[in-house]
Amino acid sequence: MKSATAGEVVEILHRRYPPETAQEWDRVGVALGDLSGSAKRIYFAVDVLPETVAEAIEWGADFFIAHHPLFLFELAEPAPGEEPLPIAPWKSQLAAQLEISGAVLLILHTNADVANPGVSDALAQALGLINVVEMPEGLGRVGEVVRPVPLQKFVEQISRSIPVGANGVRATGDSQQLIKRIALCGGSGDDRFEIVQGLGVDAYLTSDLKHHRVSEALAGGAPVLIDAGHFATEWPWLPQAARLLAEDLEECGYAQPEMKISKISTDPWRVR
Ligand SMILES: [Zn+2]
C-alpha cells in the first residue's frame, strides 16, 4: 500500500478542517516544509514550543500538526505607518530546526474549533457528555451529564478526565448545586458569556477566565463558570484528530503512518 505524501495528508486534513472556516485573524495551514516529502511519522501537539519541537525531532517526525500557530500576529498586515511585528528569535530558531529536520508544520486552529467533530466535541467526549449539540456559529458545544451531579463532584470529574495544569479546575457558584446541562468551549471562551446565558445551561466550561469579565457576567445572570485551563480543554482534540486522520487515510487507500500524540504538558502554569 502506498504512503501518502505530506501534501496529500494536508489535503485530507483540510477536508475536515477547511482553512477558509478559520477566523479572519487566524493563521492556519502549512507554516513550513516541503509538501512533496513523506508523511510517515505524524506528530500532534497543542503548541509549537522548544520542548515539543525537540520531542518531535527526536522521534523522527516528518509531519508536525499543531493546534496553535507558531506565527500569528507576526504575519499580520501592519497598520498604515507601522512596522510589522518582529519574529522572536526563539520562533525563528524552532522554525529552522523543523526545516532542517525536513518536517512539515501544519496548523489546524480555529478551523479545528468550528469543525464537527472538532475541539469542543473532543472535550465533551473526554468528559463523557451525552446529547452534544452545537452552540451558535459552530464554536462550542452544549451537552449533558448522564446523571445530575453536584458541582464539586463535576469539577473533580473534569480534573480526572483531562490533563489539568497547576491552576486546577476552578468554578464559580455553590459546590453542592446540581449540574446537568453544560455549555463548553475548548480554549479561551470568555467572549461567549452572553450567548451561553441564553442557552439555559447549568454551567459553562472554558478557560482563560479573568476577574472582571467573570464577576460582571455573574452579576448579569451567567450560569456557573468553570475554568479548566487552556491546554487541558484543547488537548483531547489531538487523539480525536489522529483517529479521524487514520480513518480518512484508510478510506483513501493509503498506508497507515505512525502517529504520536505528545503527552508533554505545554500548560505554562507549573507550581501552586
Ligand atoms: Zn487554544
Image (spheres, grey):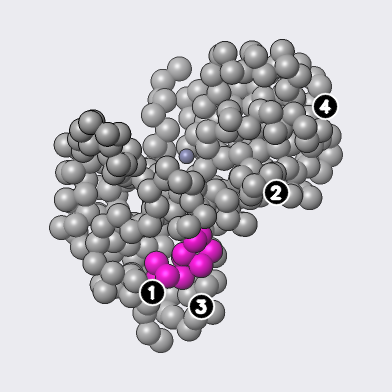
Q: CA distance from mark 2 to mark 3?
A: 28 Å
Q: Which mark is residue 134?
A: 2
Please tell me which of labels 1 and 3 falls first in the chain: 1
Q: CA distance from mark 4 to mark 2?
A: 23 Å
Question: Three-letter amino acid code at disc 2?
Answer: Glu
**Residue at 48% from the left image edge and 83% from the top image edge:** 253
Q: Nearer the viewer, residue 196 or 23?
A: 23
Image depth: mark 2 or mark 3 in front: 2
Question: Three-letter amino acid code at disc 1?
Answer: Glu
- Tag 1: Cα neighbours inside 10 Å, few (<14), some, or many (≥20)? some
Q: CA distance from mark 1 to mark 2?
A: 30 Å
Image depth: mark 1 or mark 4 in front: 1
Q: Is residue 61 left or right of residue 236?
A: left
Q: Is residue 15 covered in magenta? A: yes
Q: CA distance from mark 4 to mark 3?
A: 43 Å
Q: Position of residue 177 (x, y in %)?
A: 81, 22
